[in-house]
Amino acid sequence: MPQLPQLTFDRLRFAFSRMKERLWVKPLVLCVLSVCGTFLAMLADDLGLAGTVPRINRASVESLLSIMASSMLVIATFAVGSMVAAYASASTGATPRSLPLVIADDVTQNALSAFIGAFIFSIVSLIAVKNDIFDSAGLFAIFILTLLVFAIVIITFVRWVDRIARLGQVVNTIEKAEKAAGDALDRRRHAPTLGAMAVSRQQPGHTGVPVCSSTVGYVQHIDLETLQSRAETLNCRIVVTALPGTFVSTSRPLLYVERDPQQDLEKSEDTEVFKPDAFASAFTININRSFEDDPRFGLLALSEIAGKALSPGINDPGTAIDVIGTLVRLFTLWQSPLEKNRLQALCYNRVSVPELVTDDMFDDAFTVIARDGAGMAEVAIRLQKAFCALAETNDQAMGAAARNHSRMALTRSELAMGLQEDINAVRRAAEFSADGN
């Protein structure tokens, strides 16, 4: 029987962040609040306010609620249709990987929640009013609540109209992908090993017991608190080999459990204590990658947007150039000075986690653009200027990666371009890589 995952604060944080991609969460909360608001209005009758509040005509309240009930259902249906169209546009015009970012748009979710919540409030309140549940004070409370809901719906609708006009457009999707990637990169640069010990990717073969996944998919999240707890129980060390974003199978180890060479974990007296499922349960694995704990996924999504823009069917080099500028900003953020008050302290001294490799991040960000834009002079030149800007930073690893990708991009352009003047222009832009600056 598979080991159930422990409920930890870090796991709750990740689950809460993933809830933003569920369209039903906010509407459900607003529906509950709407029903509660109707029943709370009954308390006004119990407070003895009948002689102090104005008397409201019951027919006028019924009329307002009837108008709201009929109109909110239409608006909610229209909102869903507009949202579906925007999601389809984001998926086809940018990249399907950006769809979770578009779905998680706060303004759109708040609008749909307000429309559905107002509809539920009007239906429940209308039933209560028609059945004479309220006295004069309760009726006045319902009247005030109805006006308040009307005001909220109008303000929300005005904001939503402005947002829905841009939702799903490529420029808006690039902005959302940049923010998601920037947030993930900023968190990771202040916690390069997620609060655990550091381990090098070039470390020789592990001698510990490998723990593999029981499912096939991408690692979305690692609960290091659970791993630390298990390591303390077994008096061992854990070396994580699969960072968030890694594709794992039933034969690829998620981690290695290392212990004293004189003690064999699988043959010692602690056999019933050592349960691989207890370690594997700390990994959240899904068929898709997520932006929350996977900085490389944001870079890859931006690269895919540029790659689609460079396809012959779309032929939009301007979007690819915009993405290149976005990637330069993200890598500049990655190597910018750290804020000491935000650095994550070492919390998990029995767990080792590898850091992100700059070369891998450059592969995710620039390989597709360099390949698909090799024959376009404007894209190739802008790409070389981006590499020049990144090579001039104080980060040696980033400088080496920028020069390496500059040489590869130049080679691709020389093979793809037919006009010598275009090739010479790209070479001039790439001169910094030849002299090692």
Image: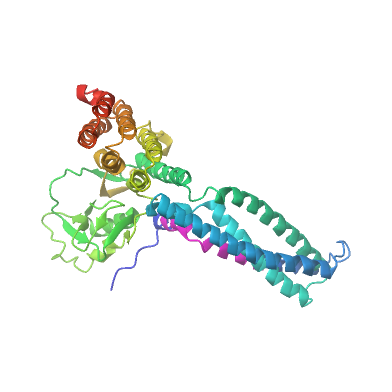
Question: Could you say which is closer to the camera, residue 62 or residue 306?
Answer: 306
Residue 371: image location, x then y, percent: 26, 41
What range is drawn magenta here? Answer: 14-35
- 188 relative to 30, above or below: above
Q: Is residue 109 magenta?
A: no
| Quarter of the image that includes the N terminus | bottom left
Please state if 75 lies on the left or on the right of 231 as rendered.
right
Residue 294 lies, in percent from the top left, at 34, 49
Residue shown at 15% from the left, 55% from the top: 208
375 vs 253, nearest the viewer: 375
Is residue 346 visible in the rendered image? The answer is yes
Q: Find residue 129 and report its image quarter.
A: bottom right
Based on the picture, tell me whether residue 16 belongs to the magenta stretch: yes
| Residue 436 sits above or below residue 252 on the image | above
Picture quadrant where residue 179 is located: top left
| Residue 334 in the image: above or below residue 110 | above
Q: Can residue 47 be seen here?
A: no
- Where in the figure is residue 199, as x and y percent of width and height? 22, 44
